[in-house]
Amino acid sequence: MRTIYLLFDSLNRLALESYGGSLLTPNFSKFAEKAVSFDTHYVGSLPCMPARRDMHTGRLNFLHRSWGPLEPFDVSYPEILKADGTYTHLITDHYHYWEDGGLTYHNRYSSWEFLRGQEWDPWRAIVEPPIGKFKKKYHALQIDKPSAHSGRLQGMINQEFVKSEKDFSMVGCFDRTFAFLEQNRHSDNWLVHLECFDPHEPFFAPERFRALYPTPYEGPILNWPRYQRVQENADEVAEIRANYAALVSMADAYFGKLLDYFDDHDMWKDTALIVTTDHGFMLAEHEWWAKSRMPFFSEISHIPLLVYHPEFASHGGQRRQALTQAVDIMPTLLEIHGSAIPDSVEGFSLLPLLEAEQKLRPAAVYGRFGAATNVTDGRYTYFRYPEDMDNQELWEYTLMPTHQRAMFAKEEFAGASVEKSFAFLRGFPVLKLPAGKAPVKGQGAQIGDANTVLYDLQTDPKQMNPIDNPHVEARLIDEMVRIMARNEAPPEAYRRLALEVPER
């Protein structure tokens, strides 16, 4: 069997025409005619690297850990496949894999390739950046204080070296994929994980895609919203959205090249193709930009998933309503390639759903370390926050004490102990470290709108009006506790939410 697993970053489900969106995405629509589309697919742990750890291991990790690497006790799908004789290859421009908090993922593959230059990847070196030039070129909201060589400044430096479309790292990712296929498409038993950082911010795309979405805005470049409440005027909001749209259409165009390659080389007969994302993105809905800080509304948590498998080609164009989740990716890839699914995996293989509709789970839990713990049954969503976000009980369980871009500081080991009791540790002892208070260290800025609420997605799909339904709330809390218990949530994960700790 051969598989291409294509992962985009920050791809909003409602950006795609096949999911009811309005952006120009004809190639996603073309693929939806061949694939099975999953209409009730949700995230697990957020944001970027926690999401990838879920996808590698098939289980939630945000109940025990903030942003961090794969751990020695984790089971990782590419490593399992590699041990079982399937060649696994990673092609990506997602630079978080090379930061302190992501440094153990790429080496799980048989081989890997890395394209440089996205966001604040420390790629190009300018010791004395042209600050004056940047202040004229970019909107003031995108400019940080010049005293610090910030990530935003590095992003501007990187963009100075992208002169033409061929210089965009997304283009390089697809070119490397075609090179792999030219070399290996006649071989069997391989998996390519093609992962594009786009359409993640900054929303920087070639002009031919940007021209598809005109706006009345006439100011300097505005393509990188801050993780905060909307403060831009209507024209500025339209400009940011248009820049995101341009990047989505670019992703669609290059995805179309991959579909053409499948057509030209008759790969549909023997190659599976899975397309999804790690999470969505707020584009001024609920007066918020981005992710992580605000409640995980559907724009972030309800994500696209399209799966093509040659043995189920006759089901192309069908849709499934079963509640699925990011943790299902790992066991699906293992089953496609005939590898056994480890006992630690909490996700489900989606292959049976390619054959016919069936129910996998009554509910799914998702969230971010230190923020709300959320649950959905597909009809309702429930966000449950600690009553006091500034004084909650949080512990990190890890053998890899790194944050996104730094090692844990010496002070963070004060009060450390050793934990051995979780079954998913597979006998490894781990450090139990007190986590920083809000904002949680390694997780970004202060959380906002931290209100426990219940929404009915059937009557209120945009989640504008919370409802009061004690019966539904109690049922979802029961499901949340059951799922947390299956994932061996630590006692404080319940206490911080004012929930009774179940017997282990």
Image (cartoon, rainbow, N blue to C red):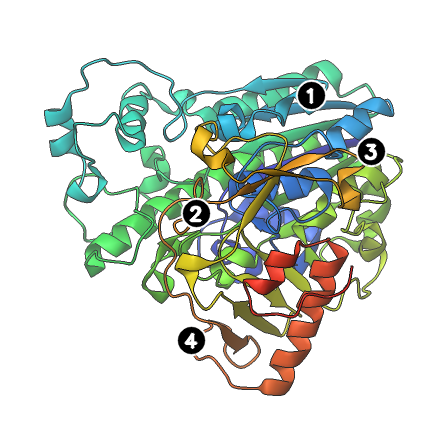
3D distance between C-alphas at marks 1 and 4:
46 Å
Residue at (57, 86) in percent of width and height: 469
3D distance between C-alphas at marks 2 and 3:
46 Å
The residue that mark 1 highlights is 181
Please report contact status of discs 3 and 1: CB closer than 8 Å, yes or no: no
What kind of element bears circle 4? loop
Marks 3 and 1, the one that precedes in the sequence: 1
The residue that mark 2 highlights is 440
Looking at this view, is 446 or 121 the one in front? 446
What kind of element bears circle 3? loop
Amino acid on which the number 4 mark rests in the picture: Met
Amino acid on which the number 1 mark rests in the picture: Leu
Taking 147 as reference, is 13 left or right? right
Frontmost of labels 2 and 3 is: 2
Frontmost of labels 3 and 4 is: 4
Q: Residues within 10 Å of mark 1 (few under 14, many from 20)?
A: some
Amino acid on which the number 3 mark rests in the picture: Asp
**Relative image position of residue 8 (x, y in whole percent):** 54, 40
Q: Is residue 376 above or below residue 327?
A: below
3D distance between C-alphas at marks 3 and 4:
45 Å
Marks 3 and 4, the one that precedes in the sequence: 3
Marks 1 and 2, the one that precedes in the sequence: 1
Marks 1 and 4, the one that precedes in the sequence: 1
Residue at (45, 50) in percent of width and height: 24
The residue that mark 4 highlights is 464
Frontmost of labels 1 and 2 is: 2
Q: Quadrant of residue 285?
A: bottom left
**Relative image position of residue 110 (x, y in whole percent):** 73, 18
What kind of element bears circle 1? helix
Looking at this view, is 134 or 291 the one in front? 291
